[in-house]
Image (spheres, rainbow, N blue to C red):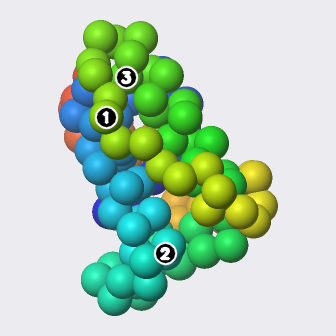
């Protein structure tokens, strides 16, 4: 489970679409008080920052549409509260770039 802190424009298809699925999972866990993955470090870092998560989703959707993908899973904007910026990282930006480089995918790193 991961929301990258890199530009969505740099993510390959696999990582963009995977991040989008995981964002919806994190959103559901937080907004519906679900137990699954509630203690995961990635979920914990987004608590109190649903506005930032909503913004990240908008970025994902814009990139998906730009690439010709269809999008049908909107988020409830009324629930997008809290901080609009995510200052907490599980891995630094440099580490995230290194992780993606080592995956040998089509990400533009």
Q: Looking at the picture, does residue 99 appear above or below residue 35?
A: above
Q: Label 1 belongs to which residue?
A: 72
Q: Nearer the viewer, residue 54 or 17?
A: 54
Q: Where, by quadrant of the figure, is residue 46 drawn? A: bottom right
Secondary structure, mark 1, is loop
The answer to whether any part of residue 89 appears in the image is yes
User: Which residue sits at x=46%, y=33%?
Assistant: 60
Q: What quarter of the picture does the C terminus occupy?
A: top left
Q: Nearer the viewer, mark 3 or mark 1?
A: 1
Label 1: how many Cα within 10 Å (few below 14, some 14–19, many 20+): few
User: Which residue sits at x=41%, y=54%?
Assistant: 23
Q: Are marks 3 and 1 in contact (CB under 8 Å)?
A: no
Q: Looking at the picture, does residue 23 appear above or below residue 17?
A: below
Q: Label 2 belongs to which residue?
A: 30
Q: Quote the CA–CA distance across marks 1 and 2.
A: 20 Å
Q: Nearer the viewer, residue 107 or 50?
A: 50
Q: Where, by quadrant of the figure, is residue 1 drawn? A: bottom left
Across the whole image, how many numbered discs are drawn on residues?
A: 3
Instruction: Answer with left or right where residue 1 lies relative to residue 52.
Output: left
Q: Which mark is residue 64?
A: 3
Instruction: Answer with left or right where residue 108 lies relative to residue 52.
Output: left
Q: Are marks 1 and 2 in contact (CB under 8 Å)?
A: no
Instruction: Answer with left or right where residue 88 lies relative to residue 25.
Output: right
User: Which residue sits at x=60%, y=74%?
Assistant: 47
């Amino acid at each position: 489970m991961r929301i990258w802190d890199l530009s969505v424009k740099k993510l390959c298809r696999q990582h963009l679409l995977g991040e989008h699925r995981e964002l919806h999972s994190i959103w559901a866990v937080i907004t519906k008080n679900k137990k699954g993955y509630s203690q995961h470090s990635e979920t914990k870092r987004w608590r109190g920052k649903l506005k930032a998560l909503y913004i990240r989703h908008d970025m994902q959707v814009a990139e998906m549409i730009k690439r010709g993908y269809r999008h049908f899973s909107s988020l409830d904007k009324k629930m997008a509260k809290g901080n609009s910026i995510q200052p907490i990282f599980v891995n630094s930006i440099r580490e995230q770039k290194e992780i993606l480089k080592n995956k040998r995918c089509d990400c533009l790193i």
